Image (cartoon, helix red, strand yellow):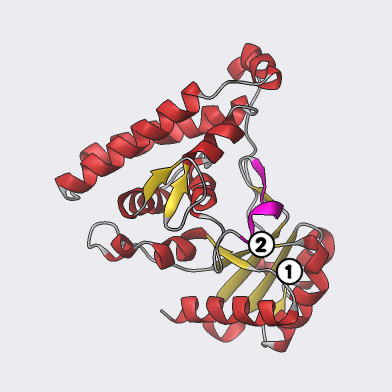
């Protein structure tokens, strides 16, 4: 896949220049999960999404420009401390960098987790970035499904395994994150039961989702979690991410 080759080249060149860049999003899940090629679980992959560190912004900027990618000048000037955007104009491709924190429906600190995997953010974080989506679509559900089908669950970060203890730990201090994840799990349950995928795949997905939910539920909750739980749904517990417009490209 051409976009994956481009992504791997950016990561390799970033490493050579001293920047820790890791692939995330659907393309990263495709890289780790062979089942993403399955007839009923395949999907299209458009943009390339990376995660990096704000302390290495200068290196990332020089790297991207040296590789011929066009910066979204206005957007980068306004948001460059936490996000950078570039375009591969001939191929109508957008390349996005999130820096330090994954901030979409919920905010997750990934600064200390970039060295766990050599090419992507860790499997647990790949799953988490999908589980934290409030307005879930079928592409997101398929990403969750193939991650669960192809990878075992674990209570620590191991090669080719998903650390669900880490996810449960984050939820134990964030009622809102847990609330969203539980809602997402319910949606994936429903989709799985109605989908045309192989029965064995359905069993794996449902079993692992159940294990994740049980692990989250059993994790001791912090005072912060308990205080927020008292407020419940009276106050919105998530953000609605805004998609930047491409029209400002210079």
Whether 113 is among the magenta residues is yes
- Quarter the N terminus occupies: bottom left
Q: Residues within 10 Å of mark 1 (few under 14, many from 20)?
A: few
Looking at the picture, how far across and down is residue 160, in whole percent? 42, 57
Q: Is residue 143 left or right of residue 173?
A: left
- Quarter the C terminus occupies: bottom right
Q: Which residue is mark 1?
A: 248
Label 2 sits on a secondary structure element that is loop
User: In this picture, which residue range is highlighted in magenta?
Assistant: 107-115
Q: Which residue is mark 2?
A: 245
Whether 109 is among the magenta residues is yes
Tell me the residue at 73%/84% (across/down): 65
* Image position of 173 with respect to 18: above or below: above
> Disc 2 to disc 1, how far (Cα)?
7 Å
Looking at the picture, how far across and down is residue 133, in whole percent? 52, 42
* Image position of 20 with respect to 221: above or below: below
Looking at the picture, how far across and down is residue 27, in whole percent? 47, 66
Q: Nearer the viewer, residue 101 or 96?
A: 101
Residue 86 is at least partly visible in this image: yes
Looking at the picture, how far across and down is residue 168, in whole percent? 53, 33
Residue furthest top as drawn = 230
* Image position of 143 with respect to 11: above or below: above
Label 1 sits on a secondary structure element that is helix
Residue contact at pointers 2 and 1, CB within 8 angstroms: yes
Tell me the residue at 79%/61% (across/down): 54
How many discs mark residues in the rendered view? 2
Q: Residues within 10 Å of mark 2 (few under 14, many from 20)?
A: few
Res 207 quadrant in image: top left
Q: Is residue 54 left or right of residue 230?
A: right
Q: Is residue 167 left or right of residue 146?
A: right
Residue furthest left as drawn = 199
Q: Nearer the viewer, residue 105 or 101?
A: 101
């Amino acid at each position: 896949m051409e976009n994956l080759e481009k992504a791997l080249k950016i990561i390799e060149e970033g490493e050579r220049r001293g920047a820790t860049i890791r692939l995330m999003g659907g393309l990263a899940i495709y890289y780790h999960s062979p089942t993403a090629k399955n007839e009923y679980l395949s999907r299209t992959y458009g943009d390339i999404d990376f995660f990096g560190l704000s302390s290495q912004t200068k290196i990332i900027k020089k790297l991207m420009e040296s590789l011929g990618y066009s910066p979204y000048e206005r957007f980068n000037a306004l948001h460059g401390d936490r996000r950078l955007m570039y375009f591969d104009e001939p191929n109508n491709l957008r390349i996005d960098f999130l820096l330090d924190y994954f901030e979409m429906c919920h905010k997750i600190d990934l600064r200390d987790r970039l060295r766990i995997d050599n090419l992507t953010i860790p499997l647990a974080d790949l799953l988490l970035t999908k589980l934290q989506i409030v307005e879930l679509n079928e592409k997101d559900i398929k990403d969750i499904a193939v991650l669960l089908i192809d990878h075992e669950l674990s209570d620590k970060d191991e090669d080719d395994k998903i650390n669900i203890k880490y996810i449960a730990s984050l939820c134990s201090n964030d009622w809102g994150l847990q609330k969203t994840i539980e809602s997402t799990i319910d949606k994936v349950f429903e989709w799985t039961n109605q989908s045309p995928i192989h029965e064995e795949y359905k069993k794996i997905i449902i079993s692992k989702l159940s294990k994740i939910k049980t692990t989250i539920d059993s994790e001791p909750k912090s005072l912060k979690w308990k205080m927020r739980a008292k407020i419940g749904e009276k106050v919105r517990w998530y953000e609605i991410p805004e998609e930047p417009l491409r029209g400002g490209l210079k």
